[in-house]
Image (cartoon, helix red, strand yellow):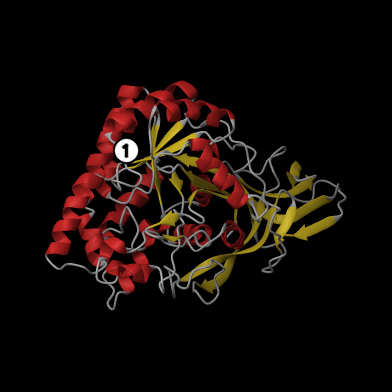
Amino acid sequence: MTRTLITGGLVITAAEELHADVLMEDGRVVAMATAGSQDWTADRVIDASHKYVIPGGVDAHTHMELPFGGTFASDTFETGTRAAAWGGTTTIIDFAVQSQGQSLRAGLDAWYDKADGTCAIDYAFHMIVSDVNEHTLKEMDGLVEEGVSSFKLFMAYPGVFYSDDGQILRAMQRASGNGGLIMMHAENGIAIDVLIEQALARGETDPRHHGEVRKVLLEAEATHRAIQLARVAGSPLYVVHVSAEEAVAELAAARDKGLPVFGETCPQYLFLSTDNLAEPDFQGAKYVCSTPLRPREHQAALWRGLRTNDLQVVSTDHCPFCFRGQKELGRGDFSKIPNGLPGVENRMDLLHQAVLDGHISRRRWIEIACATPARMFGLYPQKGTIAPGSDADIVLYDPHAEQVISAETHHMNVDYSAYEGKRITGRVDTVLSRGEVVIDRREYVGRAGHGAFVHRSTCQYL
């Protein structure tokens, strides 16, 4: 067993900020004390002077190696978790996929196989349920016991992932009994498909039309409907990738009634807009994701929702596709552009910039990026905080370092950056995962296979 001591830094958690020393042993935090007050000995001492000492980020929404639109997300579990570590994230929760006609078990086992022995950081799984039936519903109980305690359903993508209201209600009823959390992709996919067909018939084929057919009102309507179905089922609800002011209003109204309804947004909705989708020469295809980017005026409502806790979590929905050879599949037909953006490496830095820009406080940064996702998905306090007994997932963060985000310097396996050329202040310096150094003063020293599957309990945020 090795003892590591981090000394001289400002420790920031969701609850407090204090100048403290942190002692780690056997992969866990064993003690904290006011800086310099204890005469601790350690095998390794890390000087965190002039730096923040923060919990490793928990990204509760990633898609490594996801099959979509005839291709696969370009990050493997190996490349994606390495990039996550570079960005100060030490736990991802990825989505195992049930294929139509297959069991949940088969889908989950396939994702275990993809991730096993390849991850640089710890990982857990949600389960995408794309075929709700009696067998599937029974399987949900066993998955909760196995530590896969959240289930994603889709109101979008008819013929692929789509579930109708009856199927959604049945899954919610099952979750209300077994403690699972239902995650919802809330867009009215049936109506959207009509609008896609009509747009293409008019010759509107460019990437910007992806955003125009996936209308704000169809996100808000689906969000409202999901909330009402959850009320009927007596089930909590977590709405993923909320992008629009009207959808936030639906969540806020439900929460004002005291309902267990939660919402997540993503950096792309906070920092990008339909201006990016409209970039010429098919460059807008880089920004095609669903829910889509919205006009810039929606950003104020998202930031407000994060401050008022009507939105609780910022995840990335990291689902990268290269521009060349993948996004280009949709030239001449925006509906064939693979949906998804890269971002697992950028989230912590972008949210630190949001602190500097006055959108959120430092502790709120840690709350929405570390502590709440850990609590929401049954990982707290093992993950998401720095406290005796917690995993030693710790990031030394330099709040003064300046950087320019670029595909030339990022570590995600994708040929563009969604934030190319953006200047920000703040950068990850050193990252520890369960006490093992993964990034050492801006050098990767981690290894594939260090990351372990993490068994999750049920939602701790209720």
Place of residue 11 in the rendered image (x, y in percent of width and height, measured from the top left)? 65, 50
Q: Residue at image x 52%, y 33%? A: 149
Q: Quadrant of residue 398?
A: bottom right
From this viewpoint, is residue 385 visible? yes
- Pick the front one: 399 or 205: 205
From this viewpoint, is residue 363 visible? no
Q: Is residue 253 left or right of residue 267?
A: left
Inspect the image, locate mark 1, and give the three-letter code of the amino acid beneath it: Ser
Q: Is residue 408 above or below residue 292?
A: below
- Pick the front one: 357 or 256: 256
Q: Is residue 302 left or right of residue 346?
A: left
Q: Residue at image x 30%, y 50%? A: 301
Place of residue 32 in the rendered image (x, y in percent of width and height, measured from the top left)? 74, 43
- Pick the front one: 108 or 387: 108
Q: Is residue 22 left or right of residue 235?
A: right
Residues packed near mark 1 inside 10 Å, few (<14), some (14 to 19) or many (20 plus)? many
Pointer 1: what residue?
Answer: 163
Q: Is residue 186 above or below residue 343?
A: above
Under circle 1, the secondary element is loop
Residue at the extreme left = 202
Place of residue 120 in the rendered image (x, y in percent of width and height, measured from the top left)? 66, 56
Image label count: 1
Q: Is residue 346 left or right of residue 165?
A: right
Place of residue 339 in the rendered image (x, y in percent of width and height, measured from the top left)? 36, 59
Q: Is residue 33 above or below residue 215?
A: above
